[in-house]
């Protein structure tokens, strides 16, 4: 009897064909590609497409009346009410602590403007040195808005020499040592480049012990790993939804604010959509915010974006949320890791010499932690020799074999089996065609 890992957890997703992406080395043009890139953009769901079409129909048949009189029972003034409970469950929060709004970096700026309050003594932002560039830009601009120099106000932690991920003890020791000067600790829940899942609860606890505000960028965390933001006493968090939550390219984002801040941090940049619903359309002159995170909403969200996200979140609910998803994710990622490590082109990190000659034959290693509790679904493959262009050549060949991962310059390809729709067969094909890509490269 075949393993249940050969069957997707949901058949509600649409996978492009080899013909669609012009995979020239795959003769089965009508066959589905091997999609291992849900960490960058989730696949479209049949449910989402149907719901977006329904919103277009509502727009066509009801026009402005769709705000209150909706043909499918989703009036645009209330549709977020269907989204926030699921988002709250995914991050381990109370419903009032979560808002579905904006974009990730916009929400990050809103949260930092509220929670980053530097003083002469406590002014630093602690983050990982290789945070996602948009986060780094936000950190620098927020610091400069306060008249501070990013070179002194932004404290970055790097992996130890010759290592690729941050050690827990180094993070906690830095917070303990520098805590009196740190205003804000802000890490990614799951690091975008290496796939490392940071010890969120321990980092948050250490930050609070030192009197620091603690926030999280959960772009690669939500829908990927289980979290308990409320119980962990996280101050705030932000996320996008187009990766593991499959909400469409550039889909609407979200944020979390712990309820302890409800009476302390009121929205600084008010907008009408953050006004309480009971009187929102009365257009009163004085802003009366919704209690909690939803008071930070500014403008009315796109009904099409909300529909796309709602379609995917309904599938999350149907499969049982993060319990079964995490269990399956652990199994799929472990299977992919084992297959990759069986490749004759694989080199363990421990066996790579400090000086890896540029003349050496191409190889790859895995820089994502091997401990399952320190990673989500993603595996990051580092291609050797570093700086040789091997990654780019392998990536292009792999794509022509119908395997879609994503490239991260200069030397990493990320492969991610998504528990909702990927299978063990996808892992097998990913590893098989990676070997074929090396063979193709070496015979040229």
Image: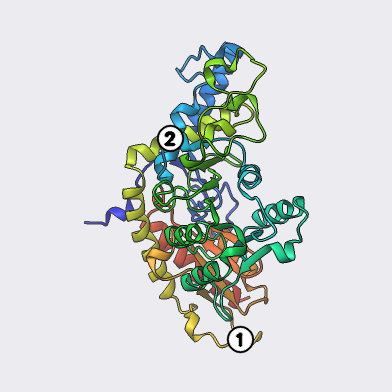
The 10 Å Cα crowd at callout 1, few under 14, some 14 to 19, many 20 or more, is: few
Q: Residue at x 50, y 63 (%)?
A: 195
Where residue 156 sits: x, y (%)? 63, 67
- In which quadrant of the rendered image does the C terminus lie? bottom right
Q: Which of marks 2 and 1 is nearer the N terminus?
A: 2
Asked if marks 2 and 1 touch (Cβ < 8 Å), the reply is no
Q: Residue at x 67, y 76 (%)?
A: 387
Q: Image check: 292 left or right of 157? A: left
Where residue 304 sits: x, y (%)? 57, 28
Q: Which residue is drawn at 41% across and 51% down?
A: 227
| Quarter assignment of residue 151 | bottom right
| Quarter assignment of residue 301 | top right
Closer to the camera, 219 or 26? 219
Residue 334 has which mark? none
Q: Please, what secondary structure does the residue beneath circle 1 have?
A: loop
Q: Is residue 46 at all visible to an observer of this figure? A: no
The 10 Å Cα crowd at callout 2, few under 14, some 14 to 19, many 20 or more, is: many
Cα separation, mark 2 vs mark 1, equals 51 Å
Closer to the camera, 66 or 86? 86
Where residue 285 sits: x, y (%)? 67, 17
- In which quadrant of the rendered image does the N terminus lie? bottom left
- Residue assigned mark 2: 95
- Residue assigned mark 1: 356
Q: Image check: 124 left or right of 424? A: right
Q: Which of marks 2 and 1 is in front?
A: 2
Closer to the camera, 283 or 24? 283
Closer to the camera, 398 or 163? 163
45 to 123, vertically: above or below:
above
Where residue 95 sits: x, y (%)? 43, 35
Q: Please, what secondary structure does the residue beneath circle 2 have?
A: helix
Q: Is residue 412 at all visible to an observer of this figure? A: yes
């Amino acid at each position: 009897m075949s393993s249940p890992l050969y069957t997707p957890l949901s058949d509600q997703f649409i996978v492009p064909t080899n013909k669609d992406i012009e995979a020239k080395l795959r003769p089965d043009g009508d066959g589905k590609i091997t999609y291992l890139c849900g960490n960058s953009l989730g696949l479209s769901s049949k449910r989402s497409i149907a719901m977006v079409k329904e919103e277009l129909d509502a727009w066509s048949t009801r026009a402005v009346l769709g705000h209150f009189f909706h043909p499918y029972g989703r009036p645009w003034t209330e549709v977020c009410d269907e989204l926030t409970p699921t988002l709250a469950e995914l991050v381990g929060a109370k419903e009032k602590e979560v808002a579905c709004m904006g974009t990730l970096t916009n929400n990050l700026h809103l949260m930092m403007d509220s929670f980053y309050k530097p003083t002469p003594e406590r002014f630093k932002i602690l983050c990982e040195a290789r945070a996602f560039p948009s986060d780094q830009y936000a950190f620098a601009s927020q610091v400069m808005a306060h008249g501070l120099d990013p070179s002194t106000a932004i404290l970055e932690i790097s992996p130890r020499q010759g290592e690729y991920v941050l050690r827990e003890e180094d993070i906690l020791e830095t917070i303990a040592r520098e805590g009196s000067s740190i205003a804000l600790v802000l890490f990614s829940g799951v690091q975008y480049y290496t796939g490392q899942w940071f010890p969120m609860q321990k980092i948050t606890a250490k930050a609070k012990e030192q009197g620091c505000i603690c926030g999280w960028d959960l772009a690669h965390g939500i829908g990927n790993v289980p979290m308990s933001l409320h119980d962990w006493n996280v101050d705030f968090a932000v996320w996008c939804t187009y990766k593991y939550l499959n909400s469409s390219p550039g889909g609407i984002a979200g944020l979390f604010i712990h309820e302890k801040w409800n009476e302390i941090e009121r929205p600084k940049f008010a907008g009408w959509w953050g006004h309480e619903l009971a009187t929102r359309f009365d257009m009163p002159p004085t802003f009366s915010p919704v209690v909690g995170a939803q008071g930070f909403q500014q403008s009315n969200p796109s009904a099409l974006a909300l529909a796309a996200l709602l379609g995917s979140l309904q599938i999350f609910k149907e499969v049982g949320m993060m319990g079964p998803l995490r269990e399956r994710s652990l199994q799929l990622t472990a299977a992919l890791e084992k297959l990759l490590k069986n490749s004759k082109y694989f080199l363990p990190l421990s066996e790579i010499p400090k000086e890896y000659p540029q003349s050496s034959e191409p190889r790859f290693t895995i820089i994502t932690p091997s401990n399952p509790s320190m990673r989500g679904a993603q595996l990051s493959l580092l291609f050797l020799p570093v700086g040789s262009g091997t990654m780019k050549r392998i990536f292009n060949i792999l794509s022509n074999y119908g395997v879609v991962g994503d490239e991260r310059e200069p030397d990493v390809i990320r492969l991610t089996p998504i528990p909702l729709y990927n299978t063990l067969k996808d892992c097998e094909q990913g590893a098989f065609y990676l070997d074929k890509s090396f063979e193709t490269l070496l015979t040229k």
